[in-house]
Image (tube, coloured by chain):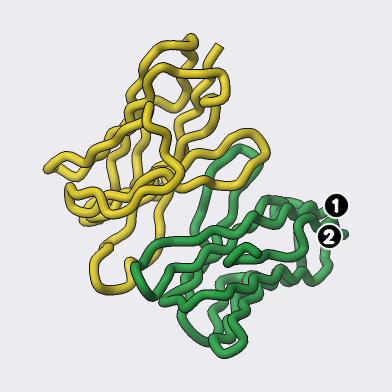
Amino acid sequence: DSGVTQTPKHLITATGQRVTLRCSPRSGDLSVYWYQQSLDQGLQFLIHYYNGEERAKGNILERFSAQQFPDLHSELNLSSLELGDSALYFCASSVAGEGRNTGELFFGEGSRLTVL
Amino acid sequence: KNEVEQSPQNLTAQEGEFITINCSYSVGISALHWLQQHPGGGIVSLFMLSSGKKKHGRLIATINIQEKHSSLHITASHPRDSAVYICAVRLRSNYQLIWGAGTKLIIKP
């Protein structure tokens, strides 16, 4: 158990819909990273939050948004869903993100999104 | 050219063989991570290295900062080692991660 909790584990929805994926980082970890992994593809970095603030954006579509709340949990919102958005969405956390090495990464088990 | 290159892309070996997976990078880094992704999808952090060598059970990771190269070794490989092994480097400039494409390892009994 990595200590990172992601919900839901599985989600099936239709095109055009909107979903919210949730991530609770390990206790004490201030950084949260979101990744997308499509079938048989590598991890694609979406966005990084540190202590409530956005720190870096990767290949995140405009239809997607995220935030990190004061209690440090994070949500990834995916809207106007398309078939191609079907993927595993991973959240990872680490201790820090500012001015020093961030330490080991801890991944959640992922949320598998299927868009029909 | 990708900033992080892993080789080989795919590797099939017999149980018991010594396995080496390589990772080369072209950027200044503060640390390098090795991770393992099992067929079920879960990702586990194996090592975080900034210099030298680390060992955990049958797994050994080394890094040569001057040559910008790291290797992950598996001794006495076992079918349960079958997974995708991913190298990621943390940039010294802004602490962001850059990911390798992964090496798919299959160990046959």
Please report whichever mark, 1 or 2, sits nearer to the chain's N-terminal start. Answer: 2
The residue to which callout 2 is attached is: B15
The residue to which callout 1 is attached is: B108
> Quick check: can you spot residue A65?
yes
Disc assigned to residue B91: none
Mark 2: amino acid: Glu
Instruction: Give the percent coordinates (x, y) of residue A91.
Output: 39, 43
Q: Nearest the camera: A81 or A113?
A: A81
> Quick check: can you spot residue A7?
no
Chain A on-screen colour: yellow
Mark 1: amino acid: Lys
Q: Quarter holding the C terminus of chain A?
A: top right
Instruction: Give the percent coordinates (x, y) of residue A87.
Output: 54, 30
Between marks 1 and 2, how big is the CA–CA gap? 6 Å
Q: Report the residue at 44% width, 27% height from top.
A: A9
Chain B on-screen colour: green
Q: Secondary structure at mark 2?
A: loop
Would you place residue A96 above or below residue B62 in this image? above
Q: Secondary structure at mark 1?
A: strand
Instruction: Give the percent coordinates (x, y) of residue B82.
Output: 72, 51
Tag 1: Cα neighbours inside 10 Å, few (<14), some, or many (≥20)? some
Q: Report the residue at 36% width, 46% height from top.
A: A47
Q: Nearest the camera: A108 or B55?
A: A108
Quarter of the image for residue A77 reads top left
Left or right side of B106 for B37: left
